[in-house]
Image (cartoon, rainbow, N blue to C red):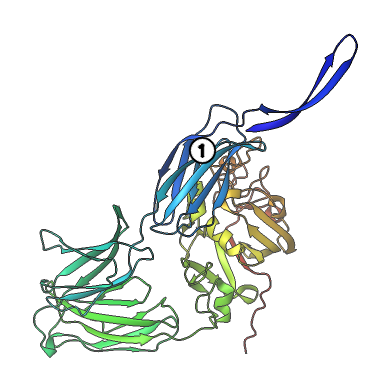
Amino acid sequence: MRLSVYVRLSIFCFSFSLSITLNIPVSRPGPEPPSGLVFSEVTETSFSVSWTKPKGPVSGFKVTYTNTQEGEPLSATVDSGDSTLALSKLSPGSSYEVSVISVLGLDESDAIKDLVMTLPDPPRDLRAINVTDTKALLLWRPALATVDRYVIVYGSEKGSDDAKITVSGNAAEQQLKGLQGSTRYTVTVTSQLGNLDSSAAITVFTTTGGSRGDGEVPRDLKASQVTPRSALLTWKAPSAAVGSYKLTYQTEGQELQEVTIDSTVTEFKLTRLHPMSKYTVHLQGERGGSYTATISTEFTTGNLRYPFPSDCSQELLNGIHESGEVEIFPRGRQGKPVLVYCDQVTDGGGWTVFQRRMDGKTDFFRGWKNYSKGFGELSGEFWLGNENLHNLTSMAPMTLRVDLRAGDESVFAKYSAFTVDTVRRNYALKVSGYSGTAGDSMSYHNARMFSTRDRDPTPFITRCAMSYRGGWWYKNCHEANLNGLYDTSVNHQGVIWTAWKGKDLSIPFTEMKLRPTSFTPPTQG
């Protein structure tokens, strides 16, 4: 970087002196640029960029990336100790220009630049319809990216070689012919853009047997007792006995579901369906490894006030007053659903449970990835996951409730404000506004980052997660340790709430749950 500075020159002579101010450009070098730009882990919506640090001093780096077709440049800063950045939420099948510069104070280096292309996305909602003993029609929704072609590969366990078909990138269906009867086929369809291939969309179907006698196939497939999330399917058995039934069902935008049903059963209840959705159901009988012709029916699930509830409070407002497992959508209908346990009884209900200890069958002394993703069984002991906690607490102001039980004693702690920050801030905790009967052991941990046995962002004198055998928002080290070792009184490593039972008793039952602060439980009449 070239800077202009003022220089004063003084000239002295025997009879006079002269002072002159000149504007002379003086070169002062800025930081050295990085080098060796490399892209890796390229997917449909993300990639990682890395570079070689310069030998000279820098205070950080700035990465700028621009979709060359759409647009607006976006920037991210990187600490001087890092030389890799993962970029996400990108468009599939798109070209991005990426530049990296070194920063030293207010000075910036020249940029190094390169182009990278994200992978195309696969087609969506791949399914087979009109399946007979020799044919099947494949349908799919086109990829979001503009692609050159689709490559269809299909085969069976009976066949030696898979068949391959290439169709235009504008196609959305393909007839498969020359199939074998009573055979299970696996089909993959990938998108191609230039020399880039997408991941594969996959579907499975089974061709019918050659015979179509009325007495050899199931009959009268019907859907009844249809609710927003369930339906009862019934049918009549064929006159010739079958070994089992194969039931498949699907709605647009969702994967095909397949169930094998005992031959003695002639009804089956579908659950965890999506409200306001049209479902197509197919049923076949299996007899000696061969399948009968398919019978089908369709039904549409009912409406709900919140068809895609963001948490358990909205599920309660849907009129569901029983506690149990529910799919919620913290990121809306298009986001990935999360299976949670809803407590619809305690304190008016509407609580999304994110932690439970009850019998010691689940190991809570785990690493960062496990705590980020979540682990355990919703019917038993579990941790819902720090990423889910961040998503839930960033939707709206949340209240935290902690329920504790030991023998015949039950207490609770309630906090009117509860949030979990992003992974970049190590899922830092904000909690305040205590009320309840358990005493306040959580406020001590306010503003602390989450730590586990393999990651401690702010180690104090001791690494608390290692010393106290859990994953938690440790300080120095804890007043609460609800993810500690179950049923131990050794070295304060147990399931602890100090304000209630001190640090020597490991509490047998704990539940942590959240609910929107603004929520008012409905009256039941």
Q: Residues within 10 Å of mark 1 (few under 14, many from 20)?
A: some
Residue 513 is at least partly visible in this image: yes
Residue 176 to residue 431: above or below: below
Q: Residue at x 50, y 73 (%)?
A: 324
The quarter of the image holding the N terminus is: top right
Question: Which residue is nearer to you in this view: 401 or 67?
Answer: 67
Q: Position of residue 71 (x, y in %)?
A: 50, 58
Which residue in the protein does label 1 denote? 83
- Looking at the rendered image, the quarter that the C terminus falls into is bottom right
Q: x%, y% of residue 92?
A: 40, 59
Counting from the top left corner in percent of width and height, residue 59 is at: 62, 35
Query: Which residue type does callout 1 highlight?
Result: Ser
Q: Quadrant of residue 21?
A: top right
Vertical position of residue 496 compared to residue 25: above or below: below
Q: Left or right: where does residue 467 sit relative to residue 163?
A: right
* Residue drawn at 24 percent across, 68 percent down: 204
Task: Specify whether 390 is left or right of 183.
Answer: right
